[in-house]
Amino acid sequence: MTPHPYLYEKLIATRHAQIQHDMQLSRKHAYAAERPTLVQYAVGRFGTLLIEWGSHLQRTGVPLHSS
């Protein structure tokens, strides 16, 4: 039994759209897993600021600690 060409094309197009949707969803989930959380971002940024501040203090000659 040969399927009707129009119905066959429609079935293929629907399946193709479903596969594309599944792939986009998979990429979206993979990208979301790679992104840092707000806390990770804040801690990382705070560490960077401390390093920059310490470098600035060293360049200006301010002692970082008193003995």
Image (tube, grey):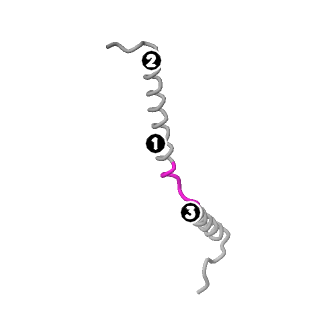
Q: Nearer the viewer, mark 2 or mark 3?
A: 2
Question: In the rendered picture of this protein, how many numbered marks are placed on residues?
Answer: 3
Quadrant for residue 60, please give it: bottom right
Residue at point 47% right, 32% down? 20
Other-residue count near label 1 (Cα within 10 Å), few / some / many at <14 / 14–19 / ≥20 = few
The magenta stretch spans residue 33: yes
For the residue labelled by badge 1, is the local secondary structure a helix, a strand or a loop?
Answer: helix
Quadrant in which the C terminus appears: bottom right
In the image, the segment drawn in magenta is 32-38
Which of the marked residues, 3 or 1, is nearer the chain's N terminus? 1
Query: Which mark, by number, is residue 44?
Result: 3
Please say if the residues under marks 1 and 2 sit with CB atoms less than 8 Å apart.
Answer: no
Residue 37 lies, in percent from the top left, at: 55, 59
The residue carrying mark 1 is: 26
In this rendering, is residue 14 above or below 39? above
Please state which amino acid type lies under the numbered disc 1: Ser
Answer yes or no: do the residues labelled 2 and 3 have beta carbons within 8 Å?
no
Q: Which mark is residue 42?
A: none
Residue 41 placement: quadrant = bottom right
- Residue at image point 41% right, 13% down: 4
Amino acid type shown at disc 3: Gly
The residue located at (42%, 12%) in the rendering is 5
> How far is the residue under mark 1 from the one under mark 2?
29 Å
Q: Relative to residue 39, is residue 35 depicted above or below?
A: above
Q: Which mark is residue 7?
A: 2
Q: Residue furthest left?
A: 1
Mark before the other along the chain sequence, 2 or 3: 2
How far apart marks 2 and 3 lie (CA) works out to 55 Å
